[in-house]
Image (cartoon, rainbow, N blue to C red):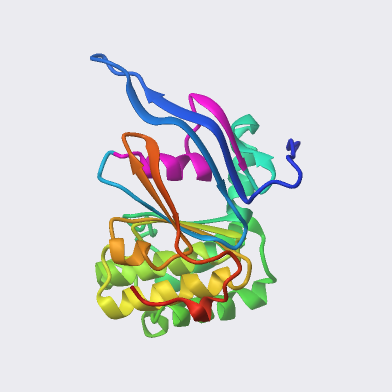
């Protein structure tokens, strides 16, 4: 596949990105000329009311949707100039996505849901995949539920399994939509600490959340309103070791 590269750029670079949905009544501006840089290894939380543009922003960065205007660069690749087949391959290897409503395959067990992305992308030797999947389930506290199907565990456990699945191919970037929305406090803390440890390994984490407490504990907090960035707060210096994170 042929990809146009942008050298020496941040992990994520949005340039004058707008997304406009046409309706019979009037056009709806979901994103309005967004300019944004997110650096490699940064833990960024995106907050805002429902309808503020958070999920649309997530869809832009993952390449699930395309902008009406502007350019989106991730890892030096301009997403809105790629064919969908190329994008699907690239996404499978470079992005881990945690959807708000899990999107686990119901006919597969939890461990099979984690094995599948590795098989599709051809990542890791076949004999390594099972052990890797079990390690990921252990990291989210679900090793004892590995053989169960999604319908046999709680919503919170499905969400935790979705986090493990997103990490299956060891992607450089993880993007999560409300990853702790269905979790109890202990499970939320486990997921947060996992995310925090990943930034220590130079992985870029972007979390869309309504949870202000979670948002206050990342490196950076972006606030959206009416499709615009109205707040951009750095909560700890870049390259601060994760162990120095204070609990809000």
Q: Horizontally, is 221 left or right of 86 in the view? A: left
Please tell me whether residue 12 is drawn above or below residue 168 in the rendered image.
above
Residue at left offset 30%, top offset 80%: 186
Location of residue 137 in the rendering, given as x and y in whole percent from the top left corner: 45, 78
Q: Is residue 247 above or below residue 115?
A: below
Quarter containing the N terminus: top right
Q: Is residue 149 left or right of residue 240?
A: left
Q: Is residue 158 above or below residue 76?
A: below
Give the image location of residue 30, x and y in percent: 36, 31
| Residue 43 picture location, percent across and down | 50, 62
In what quadrant of the picture does the C terminus appear? bottom left
Q: Quadrant of residue 226?
A: top left
Q: Residue at x 45, y 63 (%)?
A: 235
Q: Nearer the viewer, residue 24 or 33?
A: 33
Question: Who is closer to the viewer here, 180 or 38?
Answer: 38
Query: Is 78 in front, or is 226?
Result: 226
Q: Which residues are magenta?
A: 52-73
Q: Identify which residue, 167 or 20, lies in the foreground.
A: 20
- Residue 193 visible in the shown view: yes
Residue 124 in the image: x percent, y percent?
68, 69
Residue at position x 63%, y 66% in the image: 202
Q: For residue 66: magenta?
A: yes
User: Left or right of 231: which side holds 39?
Assistant: right
Q: Is residue 60 above or below residue 183?
A: above
Residue 118: quarter of image: bottom right
Residue sitting at the far bottom: 144
């Amino acid at each position: 596949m042929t990809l146009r590269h942008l050298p020496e750029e941040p992990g994520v670079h949005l340039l004058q990105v707008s997304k406009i949905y046409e309706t019979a009544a009037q056009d709806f501006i979901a994103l309005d000329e967004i300019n944004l840089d997110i650096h490699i290894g940064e833990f960024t939380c995106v907050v805002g009311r429902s309808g503020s543009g958070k999920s649309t922003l997530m869809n832009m960065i993952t390449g699930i949707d395309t902008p009406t205007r502007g350019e989106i660069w991730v890892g030096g690749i301009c997403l809105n100039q790629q064919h969908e087949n190329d994008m699907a391959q690239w996404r499978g290897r470079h992005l881990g996505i945690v959807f708000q409503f899990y999107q686990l395959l119901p006919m597969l067990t939890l461990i099979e849901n984690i094995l599948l992305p590795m098989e599709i992308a051809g990542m890791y030797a076949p004999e390594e995949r099972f052990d890797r999947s079990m390690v990921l389930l252990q990291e989210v506290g679900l090793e004892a539920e590995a053989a169960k199907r999604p319908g046999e565990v709680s919503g919170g456990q499905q969400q935790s399994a979705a986090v493990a699945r997103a990490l299956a191919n060891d992607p450089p970037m993880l993007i999560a939509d409300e990853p702790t929305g269905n979790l109890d406090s202990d499970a939320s803390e486990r997921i947060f600490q996992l995310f925090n440890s990943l930034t220590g390994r130079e992985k870029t984490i972007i979390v869309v959340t309504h949870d202000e407490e979670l948002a206050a504990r990342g490196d950076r907090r972006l606030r959206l309103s009416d499709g615009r960035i109205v707040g951009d707060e750095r909560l700890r210096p870049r390259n601060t070791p994760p162990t120095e994170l204070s609990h809000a």
